[in-house]
Amino acid sequence: MTRPPQAAPGRRDRHKQDKLTRIHTAALTLFTEQGYDATTIRQIAAEADVAAGTIFRYATDKADLLLMVFHDAIAQTVAEATEPHRLTGPLSQVLPGLFDPFFAFYEKRQALASDFLRLVLFHQSPWRTRELAQGRDFVQQLADLLRSRQDTGEVAADLNPQTAAFALFALYQACLVGWLAGEANLTETRERLAALLHLQVRAFQDGARPAVTP
């Protein structure tokens, strides 16, 4: 059954989306250039050419606004990280490559990333809830990847993909926090994560058997 074509967004919807896009762009630009603490809602509103009250239609406060902006940026980063060409090849090579786009995103705004992670951990707001859900969705994508590798015999059949995916994501987060805390530079951090992921893959493969082609 063919679905009827969806109607194009009306003028009101386009106007609303245009405002939201300007708010996102202004907020990310000012937060990155000036820092989170030094940036005000009034400055963001002026840069976006909207009333300050308009911003509060989308975010409850400045912290919620930063979480909202990062949420959409991270969604784009997830889409980049999970492009099909990144998912082909041995798992020990695929996994480090999955996290490269995230490091590339945070590298451009390292100080702001620290504020973002602090708010994800401790700030109670609607966009923080959405961001946590986004993280769970990415873990689910990792689990699906591991499940597909079980089908090919690359990963042991008795492995719990969900638990294993959570472990992979935890390793990435630990390395990310270490880098933001200044424990290592970005090159060292990526190398450390790749080594940890390699160890995990070896554990995942314990007892694995190659798939038999009929």
Image (cartoon, rainbow, N blue to C red):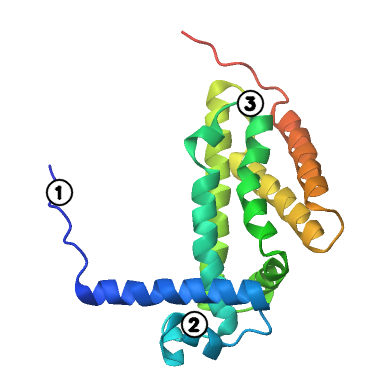
Q: Residue at x 55, y 22 (%)?
A: 152
The three-letter code of the residue at mark 3 reads Pro
How far apart marks 3 and 1 lie (CA) works out to: 39 Å
Q: Residue at x 60, y 44 (%)?
A: 162
Please report whichever mark, 3 or 1, sits nearer to the chain's N-terminal start. Answer: 1
- Of helix, strand and loop, which one carries label 2? helix
| Residue identifier under label 1 | 3
- Of helix, strand and loop, which one carries label 1? loop
Q: Which mark is residue 47?
A: 2
Q: Residues within 10 Å of mark 2 (few under 14, many from 20)?
A: some
- In the image, taking residue 35 as reference, residue 132 lies left or right, namely left
Q: Residue at x 29, y 76 (%)?
A: 15
Q: Nearer the viewer, residue 125 or 19?
A: 19
How far apart marks 2 and 1 lie (CA) works out to: 41 Å
- In the image, taking residue 81 as reference, residue 206 lies left or right, namely right
The three-letter code of the residue at mark 1 reads Arg
Please report whichever mark, 2 or 1, sits nearer to the chain's N-terminal start. Answer: 1
Q: Which mark is residue 90?
A: 3
User: In which quadrant of the rendered image does the N terminus lie?
Assistant: top left
